[in-house]
């Protein structure tokens, strides 16, 4: 009878054989992206790129890595995301450190940064607008914008001190640590207290409906921070709170951008329109065709 594969190589084998064994093990343990996970973890373990991994395909798997490799695979088999195991995730071609204190940056958020920068550069062809990333988590939005827009003043806030620690480390990692001001506070709290005028406000707030949390993939439900997921009964709580708090600022931002969940775009666009702060709105779809972002702006 065929035996259930173990997590790692017990006997001498090539890197390719170790990867195939790992993929089979993860598949038996219910991991959907079994091959991608095995290859990604191997790249991290061996310190090589995807192309380098394939070039080393027929090399012997290093026996000295056996114990740590089995430990990594067991963690992945239990549903822990590969990004938390490796402690890293790429975003917009930049390296980011991730821990369970922050959400793992997703590719669709790159589109929010792109559109915000595109419109922002039209509104401010010169000058230094104040850009605020609200609920910054890993700092992916703020750090990427700082890299792309060297003349802008960049700031970021989060209520979690652990998330801010990760964000600060990512700013330093990408050599923009001196250009980003970090605030700890609930949404716009620090900006309101400081009477700061925000020109561009971008946020990827919690947007999962509370009742849907138990239905999420185990990788998300059991490992990513609930604080960054739960958007209240209808998932729109934080959008309403941000728009309400904008009224407490010295002036509303000229440009606002939100990431949101599937089926929420029209409701959030209506919230943006009804506020009266922005004359133009735009819904941006993600790579899967899902309406993923709402942008609002007015001419300066």
Image (cartoon, helix red, strand yellow):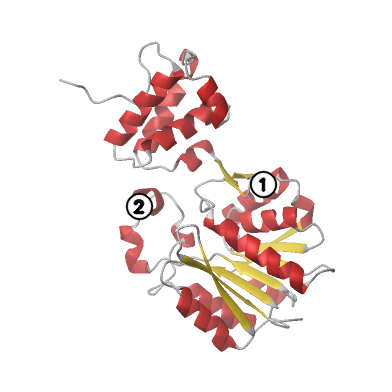
Left or right: 233, with 258 as reference point = left
Q: Position of residue 280 (x, y in %)?
A: 63, 81
Q: Residues within 10 Å of mark 1 (few under 14, many from 20)?
A: some
Residue for point 42% across, 32% down? 38
When the figure is inspected, residue 118 is found, relative to residue 107, above or below; the finding is below
Per the model, the C-alpha gap separating discs 2 and 1 is 28 Å
Left or right: 74, with 287 as reference point = left
Q: The N terminus lies in which quarter of the figure?
A: top left
Give the residue number, with chain letter if any, for mark 1.
Answer: 169
Nearest the viewer among 161 and 28 is 28
When the figure is inspected, residue 23 is found, relative to residue 176, above or below; the finding is above
Nearest the viewer among 259 and 179 is 259
Element type at mark 1: helix
Counting every numbered tag in the picture gives: 2
Residue for point 42% across, 49% down? 223
Residue for point 55% across, 64% down? 204
Q: Position of residue 22 (x, y in %)?
A: 37, 27
- Residue 201: tell me if it is visible: yes
Q: Position of residue 265 (x, y in %)?
A: 47, 74
- Residue 187: tell me if it is visible: no
Give residue 193's quadrant in the image: bottom right
Q: Which mark is residue 297?
A: none
**Tag in front: 2 or 1:** 2
Give the residue number, with chain letter if any, for mark 2.
Answer: 217
Give residue 241's quadrant in the image: bottom right
């Amino acid at each position: 009878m065929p035996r259930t594969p173990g997590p790692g190589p017990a006997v001498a084998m090539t890197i390719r054989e170790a990867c195939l064994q790992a993929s089979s093990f993860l598949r038996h343990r219910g991991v959907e992206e079994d091959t991608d996970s095995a290859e990604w973890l191997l790249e991290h373990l061996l310190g090589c790129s995807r192309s380098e991994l394939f070039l080393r395909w027929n090399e012997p798997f290093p026996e000295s890595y056996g114990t740590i490799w089995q430990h990594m695979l067991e963690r992945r088999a239990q549903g822990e995301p590969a990004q938390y195991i490796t402690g890293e995730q790429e975003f917009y071609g930049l390296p980011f450190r991730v821990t369970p204190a922050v959400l793992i940056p997703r590719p669709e958020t790159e589109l929010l940064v792109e559109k915000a920068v595109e419109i922002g550069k039209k509104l401010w062809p010169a000058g230094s607008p104040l850009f605020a990333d609200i609920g910054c988590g890993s700092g992916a939005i703020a750090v990427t914008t700082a890299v792309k827009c060297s003349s802008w003043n960049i700031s970021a806030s989060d209520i979690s001190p652990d998330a801010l620690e990760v964000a600060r480390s990512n700013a330093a990692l990408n050599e923009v640590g001196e250009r980003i001001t970090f605030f700890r506070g609930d949404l716009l709290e620090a900006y309101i207290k400081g009477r700061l005028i925000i020109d561009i406000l971008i946020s990827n707030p919690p947007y999962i409906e509370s009742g849907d949390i138990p239905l999420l993939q185990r990788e998300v439900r059991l490992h990513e921070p609930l604080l960054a997921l739960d958007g209240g009964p209808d998932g729109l709580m934080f959008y309403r709170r941000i728009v309400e708090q904008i009224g407490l600022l010295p002036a509303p931002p000229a440009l606002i951008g939100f990431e949101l969940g599937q089926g929420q775009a029209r409701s959030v666009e209506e919230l943006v329109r009804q506020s009266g702060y922005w004359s133009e709105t735009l819904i941006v779809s993600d790579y899967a065709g899902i309406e993923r972002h709402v942008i609002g702006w007015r001419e300066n």
